[in-house]
Image (spheres, rainbow, N blue to C red):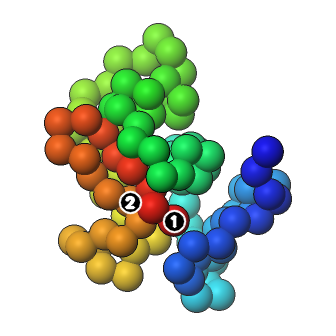
Amino acid sequence: ALPASYTFGDVTVDLARHQASRAGQPLDLTPIEFKLLQTFIENRDRVLTHDEIIERVWGRDTFLTDRVLYTHVNNLRGKIEATPSEPRFLIGVRGVGYRFDG
């Protein structure tokens, strides 16, 4: 089971309260971004395929293009990464999906 709160880098995620902060400042995450982050934390150190991410975040019968997923992941990266163009935590695995190293 996950702890109620999870920290990586300077980001703290309060899973119970659905809140996140970075360097003490609240992060304005959309419900989808929070669910994405929670899914990545639950599966840290493991590559999640695009399909796995979509199923866990949006639901089994949802069809999303990779581009839509990429946009959401990129928006999340912009909020949790110090240098979003060189991510430390949310790593893209070309042709497969994403891995969370937090």
Kind of residue at badge 1: Gly
Residue furthest out toward the front: 45
Task: Find residue 64 and report its horizontal and vertical position in percent.
Answer: 32, 25
| Residue 87 image position (x, y, % from top left) | 31, 69
Q: Which residue is mark 2?
A: 90
Q: Secondary structure at mark 1?
A: loop
Q: Residues within 10 Å of mark 1 (few under 14, many from 20)?
A: some
Q: Residue at x 37, y 82 (%)?
A: 82
Question: Along the line of sight, which residue is nearer the eye, 15 or 96?
Answer: 96
Q: Is residue 73 left or right of residue 31?
A: left
Total marks placed: 2
Residue 49: % across, % down: 35, 32
Q: Nearer the viewer, residue 14 or 42?
A: 42
Vertical placement of 9 versus 69: above or below?
below
In this view, 57 is above or below 63 = below
- What label does residue 60 carry, if any? none
Between discs 1 and 2, the one toward the N terminus: 2
Q: Residue at x 43, y 17 (%)?
A: 62
**Does 67 appear above or below 78?**
above
Residue underneath mark 1: 102
Against 85, residue 75 (above or below) is above
Query: At 45% from the left edge and 61% from the top edge, which residue is drawn?
Result: 101
Front residue of this view, candidates 88 and 23:
88
Q: Secondary structure at mark 2?
A: strand
Task: Identify the amino acid type marked 2.
Answer: Leu
Give the residue at the far top of this rendering: 61
Dot 2 surroundings within 10 Å: few (below 14), some, or many (20 or more)?
Answer: many
Q: Taking 17 as reference, is 73 left or right?
A: left
Asked whether residue 72 appears in the rendered view, the answer is no
